[in-house]
Image: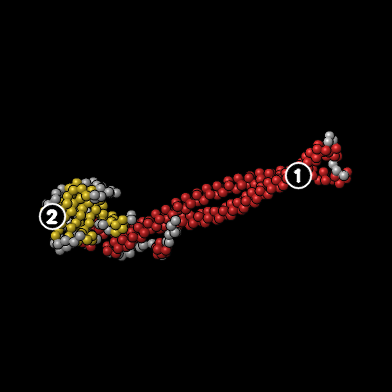
């Protein structure tokens, strides 16, 4: 079973945000806002991962408590059965003691009769009623055999009693063991319940932190969009009028960055997502720089995708488009339309997924769009 997750980092985050809300009205430039959003998203990823891990542990503790309850139930049943068996053994012992006492009383009575009268009258009548000496000897042997038989019977009953008492001792030891097991399992259950409650408290704290982070990211996103809307071109073009100097043009009409590069949902988000700013279902997508179309078709996970080779080791990728207007091998100019924004592939809605690669290495598009 996994150990309880330490949430030191999250606690520090909680402390940091407890110092006060982000002042979205303070003077910030676009780079600062984007950096702050990036940090928040990293914190969100970490917090969400911890939430997922804690939920797994809570589930494990719930299963553990169920199993401990089953053990306690089985233990209680075993104790009941042992107690019932002990009751039966005690009855058996009592019955044997009664038989021994009965047989012993008979022998005592015979002994008293011999002492008072010189012999038991019943036995004497049996003996004196013999027809001849041989018959007399036979009757003496018979009386002796009866007496010996009574004595042997008592011995056998005593032996049976000893065996039954040994069985009772074993049952009493078993009962003690069951009581100790019950005590141990009860302590384990109490500990598991306590751990589950602590995990649930931490989960609640983390969920509150996630909520606060999302609110702060939303505030920063609104502020970032104001900058982007103010600087984004109204049609296919670039933020920078210079061509061929490594600065890429804005690849769609308006729009804003809805998701940055970095870890997202436990995986690496290799580029940025650009969402539409209006309700148009067909915003055009433009080449960020001139080059040659290397790929134009369906790409696993990306849906309808275009990859443009700009030379000097630079390539750009445009994913999730609803349709393409170029084909592989085609020469393309900067700002030329290559397709229409869509939601093909693994997409959560209409947007453009945009990546930049330099010599096969993934780059942050922000560094080339600004």
Q: Which sits in the foreground, 36 or 55?
A: 55
Left or right for 88, reference 199: right
Question: Which quadrant of the view contains residue 232?
Answer: bottom left
- Where does the N terminus fall, quadrant-wise? bottom left
Left or right for 106, reference 43: right
**Residue drawn at point x = 31 percent, y = 56 percent:** 267
**Residue drawn at point x = 60 percent, y = 45 percent:** 81
Q: Which sits in the foreground, 285 or 49?
A: 49
10 Å crowding of disc 2: few (<14), some (14-19), many (20+): some
Tag 1, which secondary structure? helix
**Residue drawn at point x = 22 percent, y = 51 percent:** 319
x, y percent for residue 320: 23, 49
Depicted 151 relative to depicted 41: above or below = above
Residue at the spot of label 1 = 148
Tag 2, which secondary structure? strand
Q: Which sits in the foreground, 137 or 351?
A: 137
Question: Which quadrant of the view contains residue 361?
Answer: bottom left
10 Å crowding of disc 1: few (<14), some (14-19), many (20+): few
**First in sequence: mark 2 vs mark 1:** 1
Left or right for 70, reference 305: right
Depicted 193 relative to depicted 93: above or below = below
Q: Which sits in the foreground, 24 or 143?
A: 143
> Are dots 2 and 1 in contact, CB under 8 Å?
no
Residue at the spot of label 2 = 292
Would residue 23 be seen by someone viewing this image from the given angle?
Answer: yes
x, y percent for residue 321: 21, 48
Q: Nearer the viewer, mark 2 or mark 1?
A: 1
Q: CA distance from mark 2 to mark 1?
A: 120 Å
- Where does the C terminus fall, quadrant-wise? bottom left
């Amino acid at each position: 079973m996994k150990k309880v997750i330490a949430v030191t980092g999250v606690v520090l985050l909680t402390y940091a945000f407890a110092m006060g809300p982000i002042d979205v009205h303070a003077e910030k430039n676009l780079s600062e806002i984007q950096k702050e959003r990036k940090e928040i998203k990293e914190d969100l990823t970490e917090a969400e991962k911890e939430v997922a891990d804690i939920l797994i542990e809570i589930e494990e503790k719930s299963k553990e408590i169920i199993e401990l309850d089953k053990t306690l139930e089985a233990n209680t049943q075993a104790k009941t059965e042992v107690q019932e068996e002990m009751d039966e053994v005690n009855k058996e012992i009592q019955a044997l003691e009664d038989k021994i006492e009965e047989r012993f009383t008979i022998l005592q009575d015979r002994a008293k009769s011999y002492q008072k009268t010189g012999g038991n009258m019943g036995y004497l009548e049996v003996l004196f009623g013999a027809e001849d000496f041989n018959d007399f000897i036979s009757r003496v042997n018979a009386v002796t055999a009866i007496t010996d038989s009574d004595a042997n019977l008592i011995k056998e009953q005593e032996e049976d009693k000893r065996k039954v008492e040994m069985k009772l001792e074993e049952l009493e030891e078993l009962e003690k063991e069951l009581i100790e097991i019950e005590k141990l399992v009860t302590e384990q259950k109490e500990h598991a319940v306590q751990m589950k409650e602590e995990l649930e408290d931490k989960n609640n704290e983390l969920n509150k932190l996630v909520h606060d982070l999302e609110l702060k990211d939303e505030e920063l996103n609104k502020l970032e969009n104001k900058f982007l809307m103010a600087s984004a071109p109204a049609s296919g073009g670039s933020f920078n009028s210079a061509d061929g100097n490594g600065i890429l043009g804005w690849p769609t009409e308006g729009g804003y960055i809805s998701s940055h590069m970095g870890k997202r949902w436990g995986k690496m988000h290799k580029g940025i997502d650009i969402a539409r700013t209006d309700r148009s279902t067909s915003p055009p997508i433009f080449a960020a720089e001139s080059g040659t179309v290397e790929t134009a078709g369906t790409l696993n996970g990306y849906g309808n995708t275009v990859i443009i080779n700009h030379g000097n080791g630079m390539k750009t990728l445009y994913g999730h488009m609803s349709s393409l207007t170029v084909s592989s091998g085609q020469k393309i100019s900067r700002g030329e339309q290559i397709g229409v924004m869509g939601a093909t592939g693994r997409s959560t809605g209409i947007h453009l997924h945009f990546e930049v690669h330099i010599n096969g290495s993934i780059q942050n598009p922000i560094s080339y769009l600004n």
